[in-house]
């Protein structure tokens, strides 16, 4: 069972069923959405995901067609992202996870777009574009 919340605490969720590997995404969309060098994402089953509170406080931005980034309209925390074409899984934005989650990043994706001031300091595989072997919707 994974639980997470936003910065102000107004929105909380619970997720069951990891649907793919955790990874660090260096794409420019994640960098700007999160205001950070990269975002860490964890795919989970939609069927096991539920909002515990604050669902009416959510807003979203469609950063590319069909890709929606859901955040708290009070504090701006990025909580999850969804793809209209993927009704099986969604991506937790791992910085908002409060509980354990049983996963660690296994790869860096989209490093072609990595921030020029950032330096990766681990030996995980790096993919210039996308995340080979990851489920669709990882971006
Ligand atoms: Zn909030
Ligand atoms: Zn990304």
Image (spheres, helix red, strand yellow):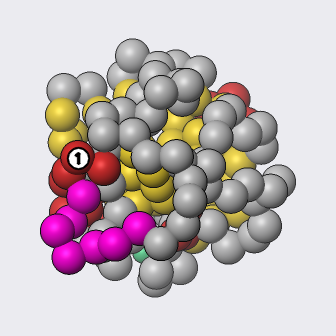
The secondary structure that dominates the magenta segment is loop
Q: Label 1's element?
A: helix
Residue at the extreme bottom: 8
Residue at the extreme front: 123
* Residue 10 against residue 63 in the figure, above or below: below
Viewer-nearest residue: 80 or 34: 34
Q: Ligand 1 is located in which of the four quadrants?
A: bottom left
Q: Position of residue 27 (x, y in %)?
A: 26, 49
Q: How many residues crowd around disc 1 within 10 Å: few (fewer than 14), some, or many (20 or more)?
A: some
Q: Position of residue 75 (x, y in %)?
A: 34, 78
* Residue 15 against residue 121 in the figure, above or below: above
Can residue 113 be seen? yes
The residue located at (24%, 58%) in the rendering is 114
The magenta segment is 114-120
Q: Is residue 15 left or right of residue 83?
A: right
> Quadrant location of residue 94?
bottom right
The residue located at (34%, 72%) in the rendering is 119
Q: Is residue 62 left or right of residue 80?
A: left
According to the picture, the residue beneath numbered tag 1 turns out to be 112
Q: Quadrant of the C terminus?
A: top left
Q: Is residue 112 left or right of residue 125?
A: left
Tally of numbered discs? 1
The stretch drawn in magenta includes residue 108: no
* Ligand 2 is within 8 Å of the C-beta of the residue at disc 1: no
Viewer-nearest residue: 130 or 40: 130
Q: Position of residue 8 (x, y in %)?
A: 46, 83
> Quadrant location of residue 58?
bottom left
> Quadrant location of residue 21?
top right
Viewer-nearest residue: 46 or 131: 131
The residue located at (68%, 58%) in the rendering is 104
The residue located at (31%, 40%) in the rendering is 128
* Residue 138 against residue 126 in the figure, above or below: above
């Amino acid at each position: 069972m994974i639980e997470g919340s936003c910065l102000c605490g107004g929105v909380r969720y619970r997720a069951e069923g990891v649907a793919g590997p955790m990874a660090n995404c260096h794409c420019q969309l994640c960098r700007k959405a999160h205001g950070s060098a990269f975002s860490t994402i964890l795919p989970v089953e939609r069927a096991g995901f539920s909002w515990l509170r604050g669902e009416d406080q959510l807003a979203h931005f469609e950063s590319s067609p069909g890709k929606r980034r859901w955040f708290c309209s009070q504090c701006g925390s990025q909580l999850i992202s969804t793809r209209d074409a993927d009704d099986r899984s969604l991506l937790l934005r791992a910085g908002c996870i409060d509980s354990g989650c049983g996963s660690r990043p296994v790869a860096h994706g989209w490093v072609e777009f990595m921030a020029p001031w950032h330096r990766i300091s681990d030996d995980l595989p790096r993919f210039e574009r996308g995340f080979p072997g990851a489920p669709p919707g990882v971006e």
